[in-house]
Amino acid sequence: MRQRRPRTEASERRRSPRVSERVPLAITDGGAPIQAETVNLSAAGAYCTLDRFLAPMTKLQLDYELPDPPGGGVGGGRRVRIRCAGVVVRSEPVIVSPDKGRYHVAIFFTDLSERNRSVLSRFVRQRLSRPSTS
């Protein structure tokens, strides 16, 4: 009988490719919304920058918009609103200046509808297939 290998970060990355894309998002952890911006995005989660610490395992609600990719179903250059639940899996301080702290926070999507996961997957694939401008 073959044993399953544990999932690693690399295998998760292959299952859910990430694209470096800055997308504004609103995060709610039970209090007032926190404005953040993604550093990268996948169908499994987001890595973002925000101005406060969020402890690992903090449950969140996320709200953001993506352009509907060609063939995405909405069409006409419209935007698709994504609302989902997530959990903080990592939070790291980033030194911007002595008086202004920032944090890189990795969020795993725990409740993302199949429709929204499909929109997000198409968005990532479209961005990854664009020719490089560098």
Image (cartoon, helix red, strand yellow):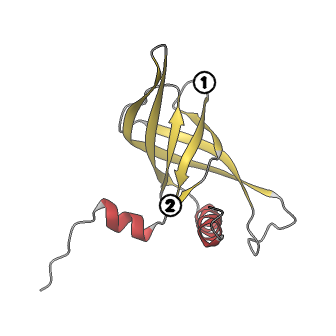
* Residue at screen point 15% across, 78% down: 3
Residue 16, labelled with which disc? none
> Which residue in the protein does label 1 denote?
32
Within the image, what quadrant is residue 125 found in? bottom right
- Outermost residue, top side: 99
Residue 105 in the image, given as x and y percentages of width and height:
44, 39
> Which residue in the protein does label 2 denote?
18
**What SS does tag 1 mark?**
loop
The foreground one among 10 and 130 is 130
The foreground one among 99 and 85 is 99
- Outermost residue, left side: 1
* Residue at screen point 60% across, 53% down: 21
Closer to us: mark 2 or mark 1? 2
Count the marks. 2
- On screen, residue 14 above or below 80: below
Q: Residues within 10 Å of mark 1 (few under 14, many from 20)?
A: few
* Residue at screen point 73% across, 71% down: 72
Q: Is 23 situated left or right of 53 in this image?
A: right
* Residue at screen point 54% across, 46% down: 39
Q: Residues within 10 Å of mark 2 (few under 14, many from 20)?
A: many
Kind of residue at disc 1: Ala
Query: How far apart in space, not on screen, are marks 2 and 1 (Cα)?
Result: 28 Å
Residue 124 in the image, given as x and y percentages of width and height:
59, 65
The reply to whether callout 2 and callout 1 are in contact (CB within 8 Å) is no
**What SS does tag 2 mark?**
loop
Kind of residue at disc 2: Arg
Residue 40 in the image, given as x and y percentages of width and height:
53, 52
Whichever of labels 2 and 1 marks the residue nearer the N terminus, that label is 2
Residue 106 in the image, given as x and y percentages of width and height:
43, 44
The foreground one among 97 and 56 is 97
Q: Is 7 situated left or right of 51 in this image?
A: left
- On screen, residue 80 above or below 91: below
